[in-house]
Amino acid sequence: MQTKTLKIGTRGSALALAQARETRDRLIKAHELREENIEIVVISTSGDRIQDRPLAEVGGKGLFTLEIEEQLADGRIDLAVHSSKDMPTFLPEGLHLSIFLEREDPRDAFIGRDVKKLLDLARGAVVGSASLRRQALIRRVRPDLKVVNFRGNVETRLRKLADGEVDATFLAYAGLKRLGLGGAVTELMDVKTFPPAPGQGAITVESRIGDERIDGLLAPLNHLPTSTALACERAFLGALDGSCRTPIAGLATVSGEVIQFHGMILLPDGSEAHEVIGEGTLSDAAEIGRDAALRVRELAGAHFFTDWL
């Protein structure tokens, strides 16, 4: 059916490659393609190269997508595969998130070196995380712990943990499962008390708006409940101007014709948090997310967002 080589752009980490291969395999199955019809193009990003500083200090989430999006925009690649939680709410002109694959388990995974649970850590224990959301949630639950910035891919963080640089860390359970590392998890966090990042667990494909050839190839891969949930979560994030500088959590779940949403915003030190719940029909997913953002803004008050800066 399709003989022209399709080029998939991705970061070069083991997890990014696993996600690109999953997308490739789904395309092959959907369209009876051969593996040689699809090329996975590894693109180095600024976010991968800068490891010595928090992302918030050097540009935020966009550092993981900039170089990939440049190649997508000028046609060097045909589509890009990303972790949904890494995607900024505003994309470059001419590009969009065209589909979402079926979501994996969105929970955060706690990995302790000597203890199995977050609550079992000794006072003053060191927990490593690069996520401001996770840092704030950790401090909210255990203000006695020392929380440090902890950059690197999954394998790097697990090695640093094993080497004793920290006593524990958190990673997305979905990523660990995709890498066959689910056995490393010592505790899975409850989404009600430790809610995930918007988009966590979902793979998304970014493509050029109006590219009918690519749209046609990708359409069968879209998982409607996941794309509906992500429309709600990304609307919540967008209405709060979410970035790597803001601790924001949000999870939408779809059951039949109903979508439910739970959102949370926190101060970076975990000392204050505000939650909001929303529910409605699937067609109102984005509006539910935006409404939740407005309501949580009112709950928090203007001072809360000033403290974020």
Image (cartoon, rainbow, N blue to C red):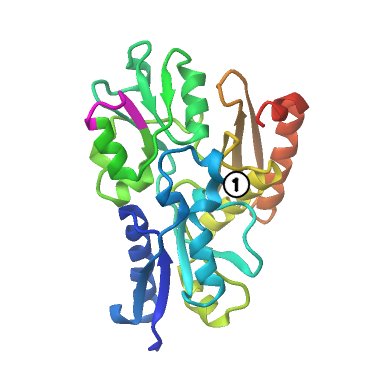
Q: Position of residue 168 (x, y in %)?
A: 32, 26
Quarter of the figure with the N terminus: bottom left
Q: Quadrant of the C terminus?
A: top right
Q: Residue at x 58, y 55 (%)?
A: 228
Seen in the picture, residue 47 relative to 72 is either above or below; the reply is: above
Locate residue 17, reporting x and y percent: 33, 60
Instruction: Decide whether residue 164 is among the magenta residues.
Output: yes
Relative to 183, 254 lies left or right: right
- Residue type indicated by callout 1: Glu
The dominant secondary structure in magenta is loop
**Residue of label 1:** 233
Q: Position of residue 65 (x, y in %)?
A: 51, 57
- Identify the residue shown where x is 41% and y is 39%: 52
Residue 259 within the magenta-colored segment of the rendering: no
Dot 1, crowdedness within 10 Å: few (<14), some or many (≥20)?
Answer: many
In the displayed structure, 50 sits above or below 81; it is above
User: Which quadrant of the structure image shows residue 246?
Assistant: top right
At x 47% / y 66%, what residue is drawn?
A: 80
- Say what secondary structure mark 1 lies in: helix
Q: Which one is nearer the viewer's eye here, 50 or 75?
A: 50
Answer with the quarter of the image where residue 73 lies.
bottom right
Residue at image coords 67%, 47%: 238
How far from the left and from the top, in percent, is residue 24?
36, 70
In this orientation, does residue 258 appear?
A: yes
Q: Which region is colored magenta?
A: 162-169
